Amino acid sequence: MVGMKAQDVVPSAAVKFFGAGTAACIADLITFPLDTAKVRLQIQGESQKVGEGCGAKYRGVFGTITTMVRTEGPRSLYSGLVAGLQRQMSFASVRIGLYDSMKQFYTRGTESAGIVTRLMAGCTTGAMAVAFAQPTDVVKVRFQAQVRVADGGRRYNGTLDAYKTIARDEGVRGLWKGCLPNITRNAIVNCAELVTYDLIKELILKYGLMTDDLPCHFTAAFGAGFCTTVVASPVDVVKTRFMNSGSGQYSSAVNCALTMLRQEGPTAFYKGFMPSFLRLGSWNIVMFVSYEQIKRGMCRTQQYWESPF
């Protein structure tokens, strides 16, 4: 990322890798209920045929959260958290932590990186991250989507049980369900998120609007969250629907998208937009602010150990 001070130790790839995963886990712990609400709103209506008079169970972000707490208990908001943290440690570490290294790879070590280079770096690390983390994403979505009923019946009894059950019932390929739409989504998200953050931060520092500190990181992260939500929501909805679907419900991600369009109309692709924005906006703010501070803290620690006096 841009904006390192000259006197600061330049963070290594290992520092960025570890820092990104840790910061993403912190952000997930804080914003997970919003992500769960987003998933519930995105899958709402997928089993409902056109013309049915059944009203929507969930209405709005906070209405969804309130309904879940009332009918399933507060713990339902954090259903799938273990898989979510597993996902972030394997996913964010790659897509965010290796972004600068990938920029340097494409520019052959030079400091100047144009918009095309940044987009290429974002697409590459986003696709690489999916290759590592897809099973954790599938399990996370399944847990967030399952509704706890009164008799205690649940789709899966635990994180490990979910991995085993999916592999047994749907084959190993079931753990990689929705891989293509997820690669597409994360290429888009990574480009929108990291490139937008990079550019906004660079412009703020270039024109001296703020110093390279928390207000600058906050502003750049907020802008990145909004741009990412607008661009990525349609693909995100299709990814969530397809990952959560039973065996044979959709023949492919494209079939899922066409079914949504035919049965629910184009607005279905922006279902859960507000929780998506609240979640991505707040997630970006917490993640990037934490990431910048973790990097600086680790660099200062490294500096201290190298020259304690």
Image (cartoon, rainbow, N blue to C red):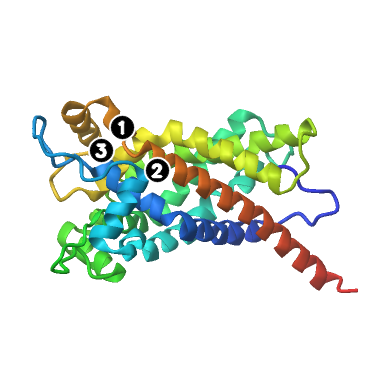
Q: Earlier in the sequence, mark 1 or mark 2?
A: 1
State the residue position of label 2.
275
Image coords of residue 151 (percent x, y)? 13, 68
Labels 2, 3: front one = 2
Disc number for residue 253: 3
* Residue most extreme to the right: 309
**Closest to the observer: 199 or 265?**
265
Image coords of residue 19 (percent x, y)? 61, 59
**Closest to the observer: 25 or 147?**
147
Residue 252 lies left or right of residue 137; in this view the side is: left
Q: Amino acid at mark 3?
A: Ala
**Closest to the observer: 261 or 133?**
261
Q: Amino acid at mark 2?
A: Pro
Label 1 CA crowd tier, 10 Å (few <14, some 14–19, many 20+): many
Which element is circle 2 on? helix
Instruction: Kindly identify the residue that appears in the image at 14 percent across and 50 percent down.
Output: 247
Between the C-alphas of marks 2 and 3, the distance is 23 Å
Which element is circle 3 on? helix
**Closest to the observer: 290 or 147?**
147
Labels 1, 2: front one = 2
Image coords of residue 52 (percent x, y)? 8, 34
In the rendered structure, are the residues bearing label 1 and label 3 in contact, judged by CB atoms less than 8 Å apart? no
Instruction: Kindly identify the residue that appears in the image at 68 percent across and 38 percent down.
Output: 201
Q: Earlier in the sequence, mark 2 or mark 3?
A: 3
Image coords of residue 168 (percent x, y)? 18, 64
